[in-house]
Image: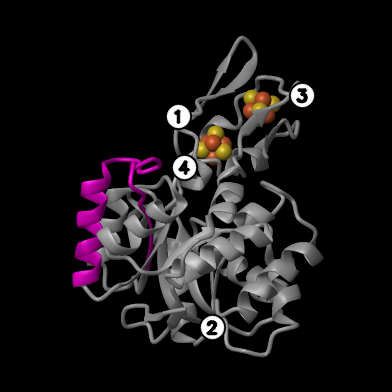
């Protein structure tokens, strides 16, 4: 496993970052023990970087693993908080849930917000204050838009960017692959720490996993990538890719079959509350039922958390 400095943050992280979104209740809903055991296995195999978020509801899984691991782990979390007070509460909740006094990276979770540094000025102020107190080591910005990455690249308050990029451009809100690549290059030129998300399009790009991950590593030039994992086979596959070992055909075929789908069940009442939660404009309501446009769906599961009927699942 290779390790890289995240810009000037002083944080040195493994190329493979353990993304925990898929194991949480928005998606597969692994038990704390099953999810925690897989995270622990990843840590024992050389991963030292975990990416989560308040809305993923995976703090218990991470805590389970950390309580059984003695090495150093770099933790990144994020919050959709907008105001100063909301962000203070989010960070406090994160630290309490993880039983920690501080956290390495805390992002503004601004997936669909293309103007996050203006729209979340209060939340950013809270993060900067917490950084000054040593409670947060690096302030981050996680976003899916080219405009957001450009803003983060040029803002001296942002230490680390978590940017969406993949070879098809699926999920980029306001531009194409080339434009996001240029924004990332600008961020790198400004010595920002940068790591990538959705190299596999949230599960849409499983046709050639090695090629799609290596596109981000080598063609975009972002060696640190968060990859969501919830099975041992996926961990083995990703360790092989990031350690530049040959990937066994059998393993590649097996992991390529783990395709997810966002499903709307019969419980849907057509209220439309899920529409605004989708950062990719993939939901509409037709004839009293939510419909998901699979070509735009990133399989993130964010819509499911806002459904009062529990009618959406990504499985
Ligand atoms: S929020 Fe739930 S019930 Fe309402 S439209 Fe969406 S899926 Fe249907
Ligand atoms: S429809 Fe749901 S799972 Fe698909 S991109 Fe939108 S929020 Fe994510």
* Label 3 packing within 10 angstroms: few (<14), some (14-19), many (20+): few
Is the residue indicated by label 4 positioned so its CB lies within 8 Å of ligand 2?
Answer: no
Q: CA distance from mark 4 to mark 2?
A: 41 Å
Residue 233 visible within the image: yes
Q: Give me the disc on residue 91.
A: none
Q: Earlier in the sequence, mark 4 or mark 1?
A: 4
Residue at left 74%, top 51%?
29
Q: Earlier in the sequence, mark 3 or mark 2?
A: 2
Q: Earlier in the sequence, mark 3 or mark 4?
A: 4
| Element marked by disc 1 | loop
| Element marked by disc 2 | loop
Q: Are marks 4 and 1 in contact (CB under 8 Å)?
A: no
Is the residue indicated by label 3 positioned so its CB lies within 8 Å of ligand 1?
Answer: yes
| Element marked by disc 3 | loop
The single residue placed furthest to the top in the displayed view is: 287
Residue 277 visible within the image: no
Q: Are marks 2 and 1 in contact (CB under 8 Å)?
A: no
- Give the residue pinned by disc 2: 135
The single residue placed furthest to the front in the displayed view is: 249
Q: Give me the disc on residue 207.
A: 4
Q: Give me the disc on residue 295.
A: 1
- Give the residue pinned by disc 3: 267
Q: What stretch of residues is rendered in magenta?
A: 161-189
- Colouring scheme applied when the structure was drawn: one colour
């Amino acid at each position: 496993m290779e390790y890289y400095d995240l810009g000037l943050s002083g944080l040195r992280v493994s190329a493979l970052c353990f993304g925990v979104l898929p194991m949480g209740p928005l998606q597969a809903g692994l038990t704390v023990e099953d999810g925690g055991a897989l995270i622990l296995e990843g840590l024992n195999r050389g991963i030292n970087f975990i990416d989560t978020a308040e809305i993923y509801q995976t703090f218990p899984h991470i805590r389970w693993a950390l309580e059984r691991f003695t090495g150093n782990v770099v933790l990144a979390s994020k919050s959709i908080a907008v105001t100063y007070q909301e962000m203070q509460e989010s960070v406090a909740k994160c630290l309490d849930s993880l039983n920690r006094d501080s956290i390495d990276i805390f992002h503004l979770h601004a997936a669909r917000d293309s103007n996050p540094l203006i729209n979340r000025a209060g939340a950013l102020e809270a993060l900067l204050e917490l950084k000054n107190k040593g409670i947060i080591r690096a302030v981050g910005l996680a976003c899916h838009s080219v405009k957001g990455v450009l803003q983060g690249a040029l803002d001296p308050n942002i230490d680390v960017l978590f940017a969406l990029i993949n070879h098809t451009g699926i999920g980029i809100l306001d531009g194409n692959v080339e434009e996001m690549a240029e924004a990332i290059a600008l961020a790198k030129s400004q010595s920002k720490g940068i790591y990538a998300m959705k190299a596999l399009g949230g599960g849409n790009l499983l046709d050639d996993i090695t090629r799609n991950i290596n596109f981000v590593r080598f063609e975009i030039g972002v060696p640190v990538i968060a990859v969501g994992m919830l099975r041992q086979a996926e961990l083995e596959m990703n360790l092989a890719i990031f350690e530049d070992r040959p990937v066994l055909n059998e393993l590649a075929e097996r992991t390529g079959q783990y395709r997810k789908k966002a499903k709307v069940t019969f419980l849907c009442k057509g209220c439309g509350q899920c529409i605004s939660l989708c950062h990719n404009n993939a939901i509409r309501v037709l004839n009293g039922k939510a419909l998901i446009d699979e070509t735009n769906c990133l399989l993130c599961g964010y819509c499911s958390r806002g459904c009062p009927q529990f009618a959406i699942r990504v499985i």
